[in-house]
Image (cartoon, rainbow, N blue to C red):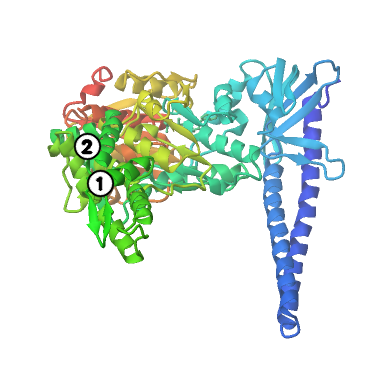
Amino acid sequence: MIENQTEMEEREHLANIVSKLQKALQTIEQKISKAHHEIMESKKYLWENRSELDPAETAANKIDIMLTIDQGEKAVDKERRLRKLIESPYFGRVDFVLDGQSRSDSHYIGVHAFSEEDSQKNLIYDWRSPVASMFYDFEVGRASYPSPAGQVEGEVCLKRQYKIKDGVMQYMIESSLNINDEVLQRELSQTSNEKMKNIVATIQKEQNVIIRNEHSHELIIQGVAGSGKTSVALHRVAFLLYRSKGTITSQNIWIISPNKVFSDYISNILPELGEEKIMEIGIEEIAAKELDGVCKFESFSQQVAELAASNDQSLIERIQYKSGIEMVERLDQFLAHMSEASFVPDDIAFDNVHIAKEDIMRAYRGAANLPIKQRLEKTASIIAANARDENGDKATAATARKVKAAIKKMFASLNLLVIYKDFYEYMGRPELFKLKKPKMLEFSDVFPLVYIKIHLEGTKGFEEVKHLLVDEMQDYTPVQYAVLSRLFTCKKTILGDCNQSVNPYSSSSITEIKKVFPNAETVELLKSYRSTMEIIRFAQQINPNSRMIPIERHGPSPEIKKASDSSAELEQIKKIIASFQKSEQRTLGIVCKSQSQAEKLYQEIASSGEAVHLLDFGSDQFREGVIVTSSHLAKGLEFDQVLVPFVDAENYKTDMDRSLLYIACTRAMHMLTLTYSGKASPFLLQLVQ
Ligand SMILES: Nc1ncnc2c1ncn2[C@@H]1O[C@H](COP(=O)(O)OP(=O)(O)OP(=O)(O)O)[C@@H](O)[C@H]1O
């Protein structure tokens, strides 16, 4: 017999669960208040009796207080989960009959688990539990889920989806093959807001495989724009935290985030899923830490801005040379050469101590697996420890020190910048090393230099990190990956889209990334969930390489508006803003090619009294309303409506411009408009009638 078969029965079941959740909430609130009272009382007791208590008693009381605080914090955490469940206890249900049995068991699936206190019966299963995987992976029919004893086989005899808001069921859908789509459609047609949403209720099968992958040491996710890469990666973190409770905490999972606005945008997901935020770090922070005291460097965004503003061929050549996969090989070849050629031993003869250069070389060769500075240190220590005078007596401490110093001087130069310059001499390309200013590197030199530094000095790395997420993988070069692989030896999830590079001269393809991580597993996501079919088809004309498969969701066709001149274009932009302000939509992104264009346009719009926000590299928050920004900063974000201004032939003409235009257009969920004056960009030729 199937329990809660009719909608009426489901509503009763829901009311029953909500009432149990409320009862559990009351109990936990009482616990919290009791813990609070106990802490206050214990502190009062400690204070009032401070002169009579001996140190052991004081310490014991303090430990008691700490334990109560710890229990209180756990209770507060539980309270938060219960409140969330009361709003929406579950979103799915699978009824499963185990092979060999006749009775089915119902499993209601929610963001968190909930069980009855007395009976310990599971009333709601966590979406990450093994049994819940069937909800994402199977329709009605044969199914299985993993268990410690092996795969559990059986039959799903019922699958339902629910939308419950504020404890009230808004709709309930019986599963058939395309039901998933219907719920998904409803979710996708909603307006955006300033934070990324969780997708637990509608995770797709191909996404679920990635989320639950526990075996890959490196997992590379290549996904088209809007395919849910970032969402999936964050749900994967929540899954890994659930599976590794007790061994990994959110402090052990780090994300290399492209900028602070993006970090803010995604910051909600893990707390919504009942986990704490993970640690984040920017690639430039990593470089700054490694190059502290060595030199300063320009930022990646400065490099992108420079390229977007000019077509400096020698700069492009410098960047391309340092961004290819061959760069790692070249550096390895140079480092192997340098560590041998730069060490020129000589015979030592002082204080009656004689050491042959062959012995010094032998010791140096014996320490070949160490970074150069440590290798020299070890060579010097071994030779000094074995140094004997003419009588066969051990060298004195003072002589040993002199021996050590002499050996270290046998290495040509340990100055990092000198060695880096030598690299280009060795390659016969000295013109490729150009400082931005004295002691200020171009961005493309930063990671080759860090790579050399690691070989020279070694690194402690980031041992506390047990899993690393790298988003926007296409924007990192093979040398950057080679550095990351040395600094972070942990498991990694690397995600991005090779069609969304903000700097095609330094972008990496999957093949290149895989050369650094040869054992990585690669998965591809082709279905795009963010934008309507009309927007996706439009974006595909701009970038014909894109293999996006749109999901069947429709909206207005993107519009290209021509203005007679730039001031008429500005008027058009203001009109679009005005009609957005009157609509139900919550976010309008005005996405310019460069940050300087965004700043200028922002000033022009703001000066006419419009409420607009400028997002720049100093911003740390994504907001609702009208936002003016650049493609570079908008990457990873999304807006209900996108307006791309200045799409004229002068502004959008290079490969890099094409990539930036594609990124801008694929930020739109429901509506897209492009404006220009003069001649349209060649990328719009097929689109402008
Ligand atoms: N299974 C899903 N159910 C509901 N919404 C989804 C699902 N997968 C993705 N989405 C939605 O699609 C949009 C794009 O997701 P996300 O930003 O994670 O994609 P992305 O691949 O990282 O995009 P991009 O590379 O273009 O920045 C978001 O609004 C997300 O909520």
**Mark 2 — residue?**
308
Q: Secondary structure at mark 1?
A: helix
Residue occupying the point 25% across, 36% down: 337
For residue 281, side relative to residue 452 (left or right): right
Q: Nearer the viewer, residue 527 or 8?
A: 527
Give how far across and how far down residue 522 sits, in percent: 47, 24
State the residue lying farthest toward the front: 391
Q: How many marks?
A: 2
- Mark 1 CB lies closer than 8 A to ligand 1: no
Q: Earlier in the sequence, mark 2 or mark 1?
A: 2
Residue occupying the point 72% across, 54% down: 75
Q: Nearer the viewer, mark 2 or mark 1?
A: 1
Can residue 224 be seen at all in this image of the molecule? Answer: yes
Q: Nearer the viewer, residue 73 or 177?
A: 73
Q: Quadrant of the C terminus?
A: top left
Give how far across and how far down residue 350 sits, in percent: 24, 60
State the residue lying farthest toward the bottom: 51
Give how far across and how far down residue 630 sits, in percent: 31, 40
**Mark 1 — residue?**
357
Q: Quadrant of residue 327?
A: top left
Determine the CA span between mark 2 and mark 1: 55 Å
Q: Quadrant of residue 56?
A: bottom right
Q: Secondary structure at mark 2?
A: helix
| Crowdedness near tag 1: few (<14), some (14–19) or many (≥20) residues, C-alpha within 10 Å | some
Say what amino acid the circle numbered 2 marks. Ala
- In the displayed structure, would residue 453 be above or below residue 573? below
- Mark 2 CB lies closer than 8 A to ligand 1: no
